Image (cartoon, rainbow, N blue to C red):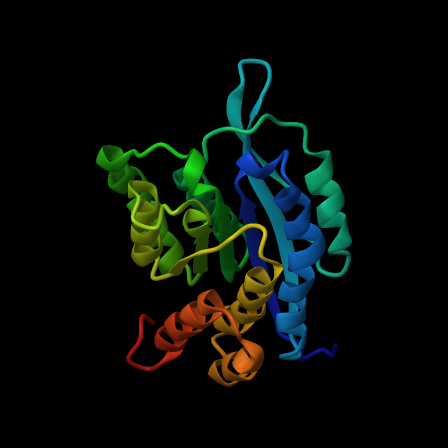
Amino acid sequence: MTENTKDFNVIIAVDTTYKNESFWSSITRDYLPFLAKSFAEMGARVSLQFVCLGQSPPGHAQVINASPWLTQNHDDIQQFADAVQIRPCAFNLTKIFRYAAQEAEKRTLHGLVVFAATQKQRSKAKSFENETKPFAVHLKQLGVTTFIFDNADEYNLISSDISEQFGKAAMWATGLHVSFHSESLRILYEYMKIIGPVVAGDMAALKRQSGDLITVHGNQLFRKCILKLSPDGAR
């Protein structure tokens, strides 16, 4: 890396429903290196922050747990995630968006990547838009590229109210929403390698990264990203 190397800041927010499942460690051990590589292959550098929302005694209030910002030692994120002492709680996208917006006020935030466990959520359709849309729109205004991945496909919940709410939240943020399967290394690999070019707004890099996409999920996200980065797309 040189003095002209572009630096990007990306928050990774993971649903604590996964805390006692293998996906919790897989996201930091197996998938984040692919994400970092997607930036490195553009000659860029990424700083990552791992964020989760959980219940912390006394009183079991919901609290945000956030790792330090890490540029080189991404392995430390796995150590942070493994050491988090919180109880899983219902995922609250509004609080994640609020936290990300607050971080974006402190430093330039380029990306927010959310992994949510759809099957464990309760619908809040009546209040969801009023609570969440303002923060989603603010993230858009701050230039944050938002990805929301939910595992609706894993539980045949693609058409569920919760998955639809995640889709709306991504739309408000002019972001991207797709489903994933938490046990599919290939799908997550393809997602991770696409994120870097989209956050960087680099269409040529996105097309290069798409060369070995073989899953329906990966190609679906790729098509959405092409539309987002195209002159007539979401931007």
Q: Position of residue 168 (x, y in %)?
A: 29, 51
* Left or right side of 192 for 134: left
Q: Residue at x 48, y 51 (%)?
A: 105
Work out whether residue 116 or residue 36 is closer to the camera in this orientation and state it: 116
Q: Residue furthest left?
A: 126
Q: Quadrant of the C terminus?
A: bottom left
Q: Given the current orientation, which residue lies at the most extreme top position?
A: 59
Quadrant location of residue 40?
Answer: bottom right
Identity of the residue furthest to the front in this view: 156
Q: Is residue 82 above or below residue 200?
A: above
Q: Position of residue 229 (x, y in %)?
A: 39, 76
User: Residue visible at 60% across and 17% down?
Assistant: 57
Residue 67 seen by the camera: no
Q: Where is residue 230, by image quadrant?
A: bottom left
Count of numbered marks: 0
Seen in the image, is 230 located left or right of residue 117? left
At x 71% / y 78%, what residue is drawn? 3
Instruction: Say whether residue 173 is visible.
Output: yes
On screen, residue 86 above or below 45:
above
Q: Residue at x 53, y 51 (%)?
A: 106
Q: Measuring from the top left, give residue 217's x and y in whole percent.
A: 46, 65
The front one of 107 and 229 is 229
Judge left or right: residue 29 versus residue 207.
right
Relative height, residue 42 to residue 169 (above, below): below
Quadrant location of the N terminus?
Answer: bottom right
Residue 45 percent coordinates (x, y): 67, 69
